[in-house]
Image (cartoon, rainbow, N blue to C red):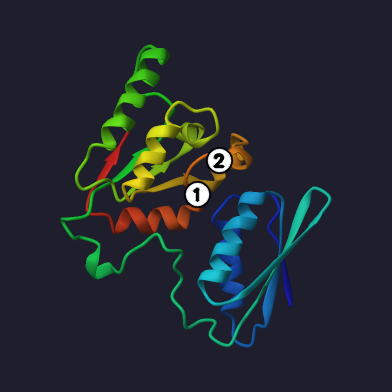
Amino acid sequence: MKTLDMRGQPCPIPVVNARKALDEQGAKGVVVLVDNIVAVQNLEKMALGTGRTFSCAKDGEWYKASIVNGADSGLAPERDGLLEPAAAAKDPSRGPVVLITAEAMGRGADDLGRLLLKGFVFSLTRLDPPPEAVVFLNGGALLTAEGANSVPDLKTLVENGSEILTCGTCANYYKTAETLAVGKIVDMTAITDLLAKASGVITI
């Protein structure tokens, strides 16, 4: 099988290159070398979501992920349960996608900004319909980690039917992947697809 050295490459580059190699005619599979657990998780989601077999072993500070093409590979659509069919994407009964890009809201005093953002997240739990998803990027990734004051309200959103998604590159940068308290980690390709098909997008 072909080996791809993706150590040091940010998401979604390892997933994109692995998928390209797997789709080559006659490819039996691919071995991908990565240096963080977030990349491993994203490769696993891609593999299982497309009917392939996935395994991984750790070697020192890096990971060796193996993906093997199955009988149905290439036929199943690349989905991870986050996205609805395109025909339903503009359904007005679906709430917006909320994009939170910082740990504080607005410009000015940081303490005030964090208080405002906590209030905003709480207000999302009152929306009807609830947000389709709340996506956390950059400093926003800190809000889904253990100990963040927004976690209880985010768990309420999950109970209400919302997806809570944290950017994998951001979680890796802030070292919060191992302390994720709510939702799941996704790569930028999944975030882009979700935003493109959303009924509306609110950015904070």
**C-beta proximity under 8 Å, tags 1 and 2:** yes
Rendered location of residue 22, percent (x, y): 60, 76
- Residue tagged by mark 2? 180
* Residue drawn at (28%, 68%) of the image: 86
Q: In the rendered image, which quarter contains the C terminus? A: top left
> Disc 2 residue type?
Leu
Q: Nearer the viewer, residue 146 or 7?
A: 146
Residue 95 placement (x, y as % from top left): 23, 49
Judge from the rendering whether residue 154 lies leftward or rightward of residue 31; answer left or right. Answer: left
Q: Position of residue 153 (x, y in %)?
A: 37, 34
Report which quarter residue 119 is drawn in.
Answer: top left
Query: How many neighbours does mark 2 have within 10 angstroms: few (below 14), some (14-19), or many (20 or more)?
Result: many
Percent x, y for residue 145?
53, 35
Report helix, strand or loop for mark 1. Answer: strand
Residue 188 sits above or below residue 112 on the image: below
Q: Residue at x 42, y 63 (%)?
A: 81
Which residue is label 1 attached to? 184
Q: As shown in the figure, which amino acid type bears the numbered disc 1?
A: Lys
